[in-house]
Image (tube, coloured by chain):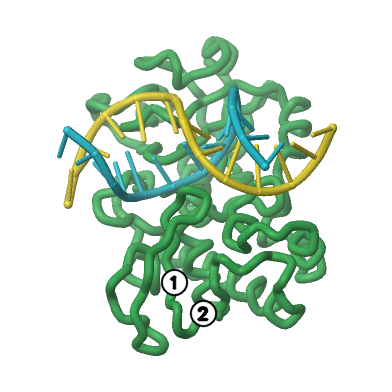
Chain colours: A green, B cyan, C yellow
Amino acid sequence: MPELPEVETISRQLHQALKGQKIIKVTILSAKNFVGNPQEVVGQRIIAVERRAKMIWFKLANNLTLAVHLKLTGQLILGQGQPGKYTRVFIDLGSGQKLFFNDVRKFGWMKVIKNRELAKMNLDFGLEPFDKTFTSDYLKKVFSRTSKPVKLVLLDQTKIAGIGNIYANEALFAAGIAPSRPAKGLSNKEIKKLRAEILKVLQAAIKYKGTSDRDEAYRQIDGAKGQFQNFLQVYRRQGQKCPRCGGMIKRIALGGRGTFFCSYCQK
DNA sequence: TGATATGTTATCTT
DNA sequence: CAAGATAACATATC
C-alpha cells in the first residue's frame, strides 16, 4: 500500500521529472476521482512536487495545488502510451509525456486546492516522522492520553502522519513491542526505542523505494516495483518463523486490520 | 461463495 | 460530549 516511503518515492521522482513542466490538458475518465475544476490547472506550470502525510502535492504557479491521494491501489505513472483499463485521470504535459493516475478500487482522488486551504488541511494531520519536532517526548504525550492498542495510535494520521499498516507492524517488531499493548502502558525506554525504530524502518523503506507486496498496486513512476518487500520481517508472514527468535509469527485483527507479530519476542 | 486486503471517513455505540 | 468501535467505500484475488 502507498504509505510514507512509497509516497515519498513517487513524490521525489515526480519532482525530478516534472518540475518546471506545464500542464497542457486534463482528461477525466472517472468523475468521482477528480474533485474541482480541471480547467483551473490547465496551462499552469508545476513549481514543485511535495509529499505531506500520504498525499502528493503538485504546487502550481497560480497558488493552486493539485493534491493526490492514492489510498489503497492508486498509481502515478509517467509514460508516453495510452490510458489503461484502470486509468481514472491522465494529464498531458509540455514534454509530450502523460501522467496516468491509475486506481483499481477507485478510492483515490485528485483535488484542486487553493494554497490557503492547504494550510488549514495541514492542521488535520499529525507530525511528520522526519520532522525534528517528532521527539520521544511528543510520542510520550500522545501515548499517555489513550489506552488504545499502541499499533492503532501509530496508524492515527492526526497524531503521526504517514505510517500505514505495513510500517506500523514492522516498527513494533523492530522495537520488540506487542501491537496490542495499551499505548499509555509503554515505558519511556520503550517509547524511545519505538521512535528510533520507526525512523529506521521508514528510512530503509525509502532507500529500497517502497514495498510492492505481491501484485499490489504500488509502483514507481516508471512502473517498476519497490524492493522493500524483500526485507519485511513480520508483515503478512503469519505461520512463518520469527527472524529474530525463531518463534511463530501470528496474525490477529486490531481495528479490523491485519496485525502481524512474534508472540515470543514482542512483549 | 465468502473471506481477505486496505486508508480514510461516516456513523453508530458506549 | 467525546472517545472508541465498526461499517462503508470498490474490486481483485485466494
Could one spot residue A34 in this view of the protein?
yes
**Marks 2 and 1 in Cβ contact (< 8 Å):** yes
Asked if residue A215 is positioned above or below residue A209 in the image, the reply reads above
Badge 2 marks a residue whose secondary structure is loop
Outermost residue to the bottom: A245
Asked if residue C13 is positioned above or below residue A58 in the image, the reply reads below
The residue singled out by tag 1 in the image is A261
Q: Chain of mark 1?
A: A
Mark 2 and mark 1: span between their CA atoms?
7 Å
Q: How far across and down, in percent of the image, does residue A46 sit? A: 57, 31
Q: Is residue A185 left or right of residue A104?
A: right
Asked if residue A194 is positioned above or below residue A216 in the image, the reply reads below
Q: How far across and down, in percent of the image, does residue A242 sit? A: 36, 81
Asked if residue A103 is positioned above or below residue A198 in the image, the reply reads above
Q: Residues within 10 Å of mark 1 (few under 14, many from 20)?
A: many
Residue plotted at (77% across, 31% down) = A120
Q: How far across and down, in percent of the image, does residue A61 sit? A: 66, 26
Residue nearer the viewer, A55 or A153: A153
Residue nearer the viewer, A47 or A9: A9
Amino acid found under the numbered disc labelled 2: Gln
Badge 1 marks a residue whose secondary structure is strand
Within the image, what quadrant is residue A48 found in? top right
The residue singled out by tag 2 in the image is A266
- The mark nearer the N terminus, 2 or 1, is 1
Could you say which disc has been placed on residue A148 in the image?
Answer: none
Residue plotted at (26% across, 55% down) = A214
Residue plotted at (66% across, 65% down) = A182
Q: Is residue A120 left or right of residue A51?
A: right
Q: Is residue A8 left or right of residue A105?
A: right
Q: Chain of mark 2?
A: A
Could one spot residue A100 in this view of the protein?
no
Q: How far across and down, in percent of the image, does residue A138 sit? A: 80, 63
